[in-house]
Image (cartoon, grey):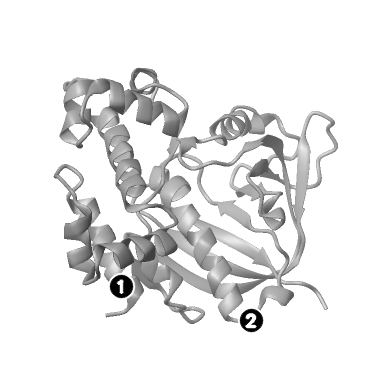
Amino acid sequence: MEAWDSISKVANYIEENLEKKITIEALAEIAHLSPFYFQRLFKRLVDKTVIEYVKLRRLAKVADEFKVNQDDSILSICLKYGFKNHETFSRNFKEAYGITPSEYRDDPVILSHFTKPDISLQYNVIDEDVPVVTDGIVLEITRIALDKSKFFAGYIATGVLEVPSVDPLVEVWQKVHRTKVNFKGYTPKGNEIGINLNLAKRTKDLKYFAGAETNKEVQDESLETYVVNKGKYIVCKFEAEDFNTLITDTIGKVYSYMYLWIRSKKLMSSVEHIALEMYYDSSGDSSYMELWIPLKTN
């Protein structure tokens, strides 16, 4: 068994047993490692200690249950997932997301959770134009040639990218959806686009453009603009079970995988260090989108 495969089995076990008592010893036995080496390997591959990881996954499950279960009390739900009392749970929830459980239940905003990692994606590099299904994600990498530029108008959000947290991009996307019909040249059947403009800096400081497609470059001081230039792109097409999963859990995994894929294919010097999130439906029903990486022009 590969080391990553043993930790993947542990992550699956944790996910299936979040309502039960979970011990380091039991997890180490599943991984066929001593508790000491298991914890070191887990931290290396998941970037969290086992204890912290289990806590964050339980918080994510509690948050999901708050949205669908209005009958049970906060106390009964937090006890169900192994938190000793309301006070401990509330402190952990607020430390993770910046809001109290009561505030979230009254207004269930979109949260950025620390997701269950798909460790296999870190070690399996697929070929181009070969779909792969893994951990609820369907993805395929291909190349396209864009024969004419695409224009977008919208707004820029700033802040800090942290996981877990309240999703910092909700407000800017809501603003785009409220106002896009008033953009000059707005294209109703066009794409929407999201871009982390600080991606190349590898920083938590957020500078994110969210916009809707227009038929030409907009001249409006109240709006920001972005041009997707004609040229060649590496494109990762991917789907998830639903739109909320697509824009939270799934897209983070796809970003990590695309970095691994480009590096493994020795294309780091051939691509621009920016990624374009291309959305095809903003209705909230779509579970499909694409991540475009521009190839440098010679």
Residue 286 shows in this picture: no
**Where is residue 166 shown, x and y percent of the image?**
48, 32
Tell me which corner region of the image, top left, top right, bottom left or bottom right, holds residue 162. top right
Q: Are marks 1 and 2 in contact (CB under 8 Å)?
A: no
Cα distance in 3D space between marks 1 and 2:
25 Å
Q: Is residue 150 left or right of residue 265?
A: right
Q: Is residue 109 above or below residue 195?
A: above
**Where is residue 51 shown, x and y percent of the image?**
31, 47
Tell me which corner region of the image, top left, top right, bottom left or bottom right, holds residue 9. bottom left
Q: Secondary structure at mark 1?
A: helix
Q: Residue at x 47, y 71 (%)?
A: 140
Q: Residue at x 55, y 67 (%)?
A: 258
Mark linked to residue 266: 2
**Where is residue 101 shown, x and y percent of the image?**
34, 23
Q: Nearer the viewer, residue 133 or 122?
A: 122
Q: Is residue 41 left or right of residue 179?
A: left
* Amino acid residing under circle 1: Asp
Q: Is residue 123 above or below residue 84?
A: below
- Give the residue pinned by disc 1: 5
Q: Residue at x 71, y 63 (%)?
A: 273
